[in-house]
Amino acid sequence: MARAGFLLASSCLAACSALGRTDARRPVRPARFPAESGRVAYRATAPGRHGTAILTWMGWGDRFRYEARYRMEGEKSQPFSWSYWCLGRGSELFLRSTQRGPEIVRMRLPREAPGLAVLTLTVVPVPPDVGTAAGTGMILDRACRIRTIPRARLWIHEGLPMRIELQRPDSPVSSLEAVGINLSHRPKSETFELPRGVKIVDSKVPGLAPKAGRE
């Protein structure tokens, strides 16, 4: 079961890297969330798994925390639960899975390409002109611009993804949709601190590896 969760995270990272490289070819305006701080609850559905996620941020998204919990239901294995969290701080993203114990993976979070390289792992600020326009919509009574990028469709409200649809070849659509939003939420600063006593390892995935020289 632990290996299944680790493999899922690895496949997500590989897919994200490809998305990030595709989007980074065109210049985009800096992005931020619609309020200085806030909290959004999401519902996630995907082939063989379903779950929930909570996004909390401050500094217009310069720091954020994304916590996800999934129930895995494979045809050839017993159902099990898997969870992880991502912590974004400036140009770095830290990932910790319950399957990896005290180990945390550090990745690069390129602000010049609004972090779309980690689209399948977390929710990050997205610029209004990313990808191609595909109409408008409403989610939780908030107006959204619908944009498409390779293998994904985004419903964006003032920089905040309200719905994300991911389409992999020969696989049903995976989705993440906001089910609750609070733009008056004021999180504590310690929400965005790394826990003590953890081992930090750098990602080796192309496009996500931290820049050399970091401590």
Image: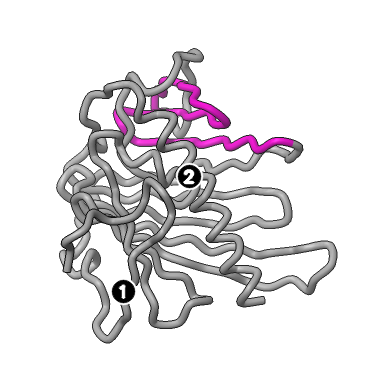
Q: Residue furthest right?
A: 76
The relative height of residue 77 versus residue 121 in the rendered view (above or below) is below
Badge 1 local density, few (<14 within 10 Å), some, or many (20+)? some
Secondary structure type for disc 1 = strand
Question: Residue 200, how many percent across, how many down?
Answer: 31, 74
Alpha carbon separation for disc pair 1 and 2:
20 Å
Question: Residue 73, how many percent across, how many down?
Answer: 75, 63
The relative height of residue 62 versus residue 80 in the rendered view (above or below) is above
Secondary structure type for disc 2 = helix
In the image, what residue occupies the spot 21% across and 30% down?
Answer: 30
The relative height of residue 34 versus residue 42 in the rendered view (above or below) is above
In the image, what residue occupies the spot 38% across and 57% down?
Answer: 66
Q: Determine the main secondary structure of the stretch shown in magenta.
A: strand
Residue that carries the numbered disc 1 in the rendered image: 200
Residue type at numbered disc 2: Cys
Question: Residue 60, how many percent across, how many down?
Answer: 19, 42
| Left or right position of 24 against 137 | left
In the image, what residue occupies the spot 63% across and 48% down?
Answer: 45
Nearer the observer, 107 or 90: 107
Q: Is residue 147 magenta?
A: yes
Q: Quadrant of the C terminus?
A: bottom left
The image's colour scheme reads one colour
> Bounds of the magenta span?
142-169
Nearer the observer, 182 or 102: 102
Residue that carries the numbered disc 2 in the rendered image: 16
Quarter-of-image position of residue 20: top left
Query: What label sits on residue 174 in the rendered view?
Result: none
Question: Residue 122, how many percent across, how many down?
Answer: 42, 50
Residue type at numbered disc 1: Ile
Q: Who comes first in sequence, dot 1 or dot 2? A: 2
